[in-house]
């Protein structure tokens, strides 16, 4: 298996004094390549960590890897191209580490390789003890370097796997679930320390943004203890959510936790609480004093003089588009309203349903005596719409909000009897 080049990987240095011994060792290795490859496979099949991996490896892939390995070794031993040699070795270490092979399995494999190859060196140089010692030292040096490279790759890979598992565990320990449209619940079970409290905050704020949530219920029924630091994190979480336009309610405060918080002086100011989860979902608009229609309003509609400005801040579902259409149409019926601007600046896609809704909305609002201008369509979105044939016939558009206001002003002027 070839490894991708890692710029932070240090290539081991080959002892230049061992050049002749390395060449002798390589010539023997090349001469007995087929026999040694078969022995190495047989040894690997006896090592529990390697056996299932080798058994499931296609024969064609094994033969291909063997041919490429011989070519790579030839370039290293004969031409000094050691970087590719050790980079590949590092890649093998990372690959087998991800497959579950332990480092001790590599030690066992290399030790038994050494035991199998030493007789070839002894037989070849039986009449030249100096060359025998030189070739044997070269083999040992290369095996030591191999252990260094594979060991480094194994540690790096295992650390990455552990970090990934820790991230997964943290995500599982702090789930954020959507239970209703724009309403989330964060059930927390187990002990909360400072790190986990920070993770809860990060996960919750990300979910608020992704789901455009207005209500978040944080249920701590399964939390046995809360100290002052954690209480402070909960208050900060509630405040951060409030700044994003959401309300956080904490449920499941046990008598023990309540007493602890009072004793610590952590009274959770301005935090709405319920004894258990069930009442938190009963008539949330009434309990939390939401403005009428707030939970149902997917797009904020602001009034600027005689103009309505609707800024779409995230992708809308078909239901959201329908609710937005009805809300804008209702507001446009005000006799004091003469125009509306729909801002699509943050939208990265406009599908056929959205395009049809916008086109119909413009015509309906016009029938109610007001004009509509669409602003902020991004270049990529405009190009995609043109390719898909999503045309907004009869719909006025402008580059940005300022352009939309100017265009509406021109339409008002042109529509006056004295214009």
Image (spheres, helix red, strand yellow):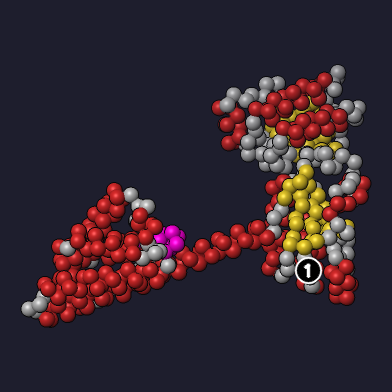
Quadrant location of residue 416? Answer: top right
Q: Quadrant of the C terminus?
A: top right
> 223 or 164, which is in the foreground?
223
Residue at image position (72%, 55%) is 204
Q: Which x, y percent locates residue 132?
A: 14, 77
Q: Position of residue 4 (x, y in %)?
A: 38, 57
Residue nearest the observer in this picture, 179 or 327: 179
Residue name at image x 31 percent, y 75 percent: 144
Location of residue 404 with respect to 136 vertically, above or below:
above
- Outermost residue, left side: 127
* Residue pointed to by mark 1: 224
Check residue 376 for magenta coloring: no
Q: Residue 180, percent across and down?
A: 78, 44
Query: Residue sitting at 28 percent across and 71 percent down?
Result: 112
Using the image, determine if residue 240 lies above or below residue 309.
Answer: below
Q: Please state which of residues 9 and 56 is positioned toward the viewer in this rendering.
A: 56
Q: Is residue 17 left or right of residue 293?
A: left
Name the main secondary structure of what is drawn in magenta.
helix
Q: Mark 1, residues whose alpha carbon is within 10 Å: few (<14), some, or many (≥20)? A: some
Residue 30 on image: x %, y % = 17, 62
Foreground residue among 251 and 115: 115
Image quadrant in which you'd find residue 203: bottom right
- Is residue 266 visible to us here? no
């Amino acid at each position: 298996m070839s490894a991708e080049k890692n710029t932070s990987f240090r290539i081991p240095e080959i002892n230049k004094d061992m050049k002749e011994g390395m060449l002798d060792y390589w010539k023997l290795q090349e001469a007995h390549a087929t026999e040694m490859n078969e022995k190495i496979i047989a040894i690997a099949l006896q090592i529990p960590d390697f056996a299932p991996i080798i058994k499931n490896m296609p024969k064609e892939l094994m033969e291909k890897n063997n041919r490429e390995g011989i070519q790579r070794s030839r370039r290293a031993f004969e031409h000094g191209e050691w970087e590719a040699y050790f980079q590949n070795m590092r890649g093998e270490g990372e690959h087998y580490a991800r497959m579950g092979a332990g480092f001790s399995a590599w030690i066992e494999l290399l030790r038994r390789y050494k035991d199998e190859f030493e007789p070839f060196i002894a037989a070849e140089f039986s009449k030249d003890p100096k060359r025998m010692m030189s070739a044997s030292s070269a083999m040992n040096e290369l095996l030591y370097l191999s252990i260094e490279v594979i060991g480094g790759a194994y540690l790096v890979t295992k650390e990455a796997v552990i970090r990934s598992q820790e991230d997964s565990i943290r995500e599982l320990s702090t789930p954020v679930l959507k239970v209703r449209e724009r309403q989330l619940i964060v059930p927390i079970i187990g002990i909360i320390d400072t790190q986990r409290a920070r993770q809860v905050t990060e996960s919750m704020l990300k979910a608020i943004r992704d789901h455009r949530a207005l209500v978040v219920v944080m249920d701590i029924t399964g939390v046995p203890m809360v100290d002052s630091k954690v209480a402070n994190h909960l208050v900060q979480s509630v405040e951060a959510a409030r700044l994003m336009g959401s309300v956080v309610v904490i449920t499941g405060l046990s008598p023990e936790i309540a007493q602890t918080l009072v004793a610590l002086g952590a009274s959770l100011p301005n935090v709405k609480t319920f004894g258990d989860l069930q009442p938190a979902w009963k008539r949330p608009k009434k309990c939390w004093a939401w403005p009428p229609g707030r939970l149902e309003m997917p797009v904020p509609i602001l009034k600027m003089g005689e103009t309505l400005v609707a800024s779409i801040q995230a992708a809308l579902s078909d239901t959201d588009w329908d609710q937005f259409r009805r809300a804008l149409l209702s507001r446009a019926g005000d006799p004091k309203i003469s125009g509306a601007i729909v801002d699509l600046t943050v939208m990265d896609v406009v599908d056929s349903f959205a395009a049809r809704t916008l086109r119909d909305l413009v015509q309906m609002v016009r029938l109610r005596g007001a004009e509509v201008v669409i602003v902020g369509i991004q270049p990529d979105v405009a190009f995609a719409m043109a390719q898909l044939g999503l045309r907004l016939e009869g719909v006025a558009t402008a580059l940005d909000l300022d352009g939309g206001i100017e265009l509406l002003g021109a339409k008002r002027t042109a529509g006056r009897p004295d214009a």
